[in-house]
Image (cartoon, rainbow, N blue to C red):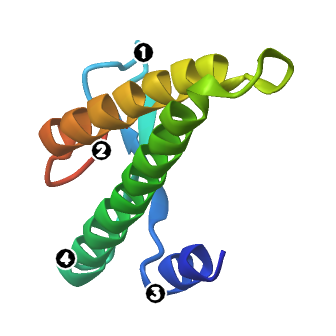
Amino acid sequence: LIFLIMWTTISPSAYVQVPIETSRDRFGRITSSYGICRWKNDERKEFWIACNSLLQTCEFITSLILTYYAYRCRNISTEYNESTWIGLILWIQLQLNGMSTLLGNFLISDEESYL
């Protein structure tokens, strides 16, 4: 929680409404737009990218540790053996974390992020 509060106060982003120039009505008014988050300078964006990477790394390490413990608990007696389902959930979470990390590295451009 402290990490997330520090991240938000040091590197705030601002929501900006960007008009789509090709969407004009017959009076010349812009009819549609999209919104993105932008940073005031590049240092804040670099700090945001570093914090995001650190957060994803911590989440990945935590998922690996939990997966290890689910594997170790697989031979516990039947009434307490939920490690199969916990392992399945953690496997899905590891796949989602990996995909979001890979897609995040490819989809972050200079102006906007699609994740």
Rendered image: mark on residue 25 = 1
Q: Is residue 23 above or below residue 103?
A: above
Q: Is residue 15 left or right of residue 57?
A: right
Q: Nearer the viewer, mark 1 or mark 4?
A: 4
C-alpha gap between disc 2 and disc 1? 29 Å
Q: State the residue at coordinates (78%, 15%).
A: 78
C-alpha gap between disc 3 and disc 1? 41 Å
**Relative depth, front residue between 6 and 40:** 6
The answer to whether residue 24 of the structure is visible from this angle is yes
Tag 1: amino acid: Asp
Q: Position of residue 68 (x, y in %)?
A: 45, 42
Rendered image: mark on residue 113 = 2
Q: State the residue at coordinates (34%, 67%).
A: 54
Q: Is residue 38 above or below residue 93?
A: below
Residue position marked by numbered label 3 in the rendering:
10
Q: Which circle's residue, 4 or 2, is located before the other in the chain?
A: 4
Q: State the residue at coordinates (54%, 79%).
A: 3
Tag 2: amino acid: Ser
* Residue 104 lies in quadrant: top left
* Residue 53 lies in quadrant: bottom left
Q: Position of residue 35 (x, y in %)?
A: 45, 41
Q: Which circle's residue, 1 or 4, is located before the other in the chain?
A: 1
Q: Which circle's residue, 2 or 1, is located before the other in the chain?
A: 1
Residue position marked by numbered label 4 in the rendering:
42
Q: Position of residue 98 (x, y in %)?
A: 29, 34
- At numbered mark 4, what does the secondary structure look like: helix, strand or loop? helix
Tag 4: amino acid: Asp
- At numbered mark 3, what does the secondary structure look like: helix, strand or loop? helix
**Relative depth, front residue between 107 and 103:** 103
**Relative depth, front residue between 104 and 64:** 64
